[in-house]
Amino acid sequence: MKRMLFVPLAALAVSFSACSKDKDKPGSACFADSFQLTETNRDPSDETDQVFLTFDVKNTSSRDYAIENGHAVVNLKMIVTTTDGSKYETIAPITVTSLSAGATASFLTLAKYGSEKEFQSVTVEKSCR
């Protein structure tokens, strides 16, 4: 009877140790707070109902960022406001797949808005969702 109790407890201990190791993997690291964005160009096109945005992204972390090492993709939520007050939401990934600590890279993205509308402004939020 003692032997039967020991086997399930040993299996339980192994499963707990496996779970705690998952938390230490880099895939759980979200760099959204470590990415500093600077908009360097904005090119709205009312003919194609989209705005092209160019950003410099700086990794302010002391760690390197690399999707291939399991780090989370950082996404942008862009909300375009048109001159009539309509709001359109676009979610797109930051297309930089690796960035050394302290380094800066540039990337281009676009946000869409409604047909027959005129661009007024855009707001941007970062997340790893």
Image (spheres, rainbow, N blue to C red):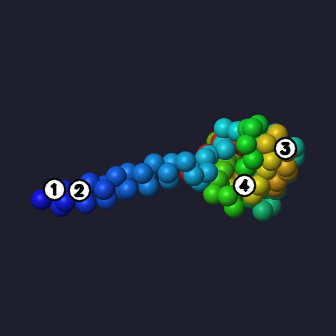
Q: Look at the numbered disc 4 and give the secondary structure of its residue.
A: strand
Instruction: Give the Cα distance between marks 2 and 4.
Output: 42 Å
Q: Are marks 1 and 2 in contact (CB under 8 Å)?
A: yes
Q: Nearer the viewer, mark 2 or mark 4?
A: 2
- Determine which quarter of the picture holds residue 63: top right
Looking at the image, tell me whether mark 4 or mark 3 is earlier in sequence order: 4
The residue beneath circle 4 is 66
Q: Are marks 4 and 3 in contact (CB under 8 Å)?
A: no
Looking at the image, tell me whether mark 2 or mark 3 is earlier in sequence order: 2
The residue beneath circle 3 is 103
Query: Viewer-proximal residue, 1 or 54?
Result: 1
Amino acid marked by disc 4: Ala
Q: Residue at x 75, y 38 (%)?
A: 62
The residue beneath circle 2 is 6
Q: Look at the numbered disc 3 and give the secondary structure of its residue.
A: loop
Q: Percent x, y for residue 20? A: 45, 48
Q: Percent x, y for residue 103? A: 84, 44
Instruction: Give the Cα distance between marks 1 and 4.
Output: 48 Å
The residue beneath circle 1 is 2
Amino acid marked by disc 3: Ala
